Amino acid sequence: MRVGFGVVSGIACWATLAMCGLSALLARYEHLYLVVRSVGAVLLIGYGVHILWSARKAGHGAIQERRPSTGNYWRLGLFTNVANPKALVFFGALFATLMPRHEGVGVRVAVLSVMLAMAVGWFAVVSWCAGSQPVVAAYRRLQRTIDRIAGGLFTAIGITLVPR
C-alpha cells in the first residue's frame, strides 16, 4: 500500500501540473518535453537495470530479504510514476477535453480529489489481493522470474522514451 501511496503522489503531481497548464507549455515548447521525457527514460532504465541486477545477484547464492523503510516504498511508487512523462500528456488531454476552462479552482480541486481517492481505493484492493497467502506463496516461488520480467519491461519502456 505504501508503494501505491507513492504512485498516487505521482499522479497528484502530474494531474496538478496538467491542471496548471504545464501540459500546454510542454506542447508549445517541445524541447522542454524532451528534457522531461529524457529524465523519465533515464529513471526507468536505471530502475529496470537495478531490478535485473538484483535478480541476477539473487540467483548466485542465498536470497536475502531486506525490508526497505516506509519512505523507500513510497519513493519507489513516486519515482516509478514520475518517470512516466506520458502521464502529463494523459492528464492534460483529459482535463482539456472533459473540464470546461471556466471552471473555478474549487471544482478542479474536487475533481482531482475524487481521482486521487479512486486511485487510493484501487491500490488498496490491489494491495489486499497481493497480500493474500496464495499470491505471496506464488510470488516467492516465481520471484526471480517476475523480477527479470519486470526489470526487462521497465528497461524496455525506458528505452522507448529515449528521444530520437
Image: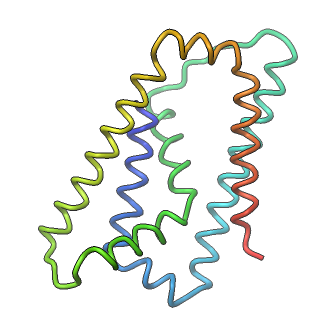
User: Viewed as shown, does residue 6 lie left or right of 106?
Assistant: right
Q: Quadrant of the C terminus?
A: bottom right
Height in image: 88 above or below 120? Answer: below
Residue sitting nearer the eye, 119 or 77: 119
User: Viewed as shown, does residue 62 lie left or right of 38?
Assistant: right
- Please give the name of the residue rendered at 46% of the width and 36% of the height, measured from the top-left corner: 3
Height in image: 3 above or below 137? Answer: below
x, y (%) of residue 82? 51, 56
x, y (%) of residue 156? 75, 53
Image quadrant in which you'd find residue 138: top right
Q: How many marks?
A: 0
Question: From this viewpoint, which residue is outermost toward the bottom?
Answer: 28
x, y (%) of residue 54? 76, 29
User: Viewed as shown, does residue 77 lie left or right of 139?
Assistant: left
- Please give the name of the residue rendered at 69% of the width and 38% of the height, measured from the top-left corner: 150
Image quadrant in which you'd find residue 66: top right
x, y (%) of residue 75? 49, 41
Height in image: 1 above or below 82? Answer: above
User: Viewed as shown, does residue 14 lie left or right of 106?
Assistant: right
- Please give the name of the residue rendered at 29% of the width and 46% of the height, measured from the top-left corner: 118
Question: From this viewpoint, which residue is outermost toward the right?
Answer: 60
Q: Quadrant of the N terminus?
A: top left
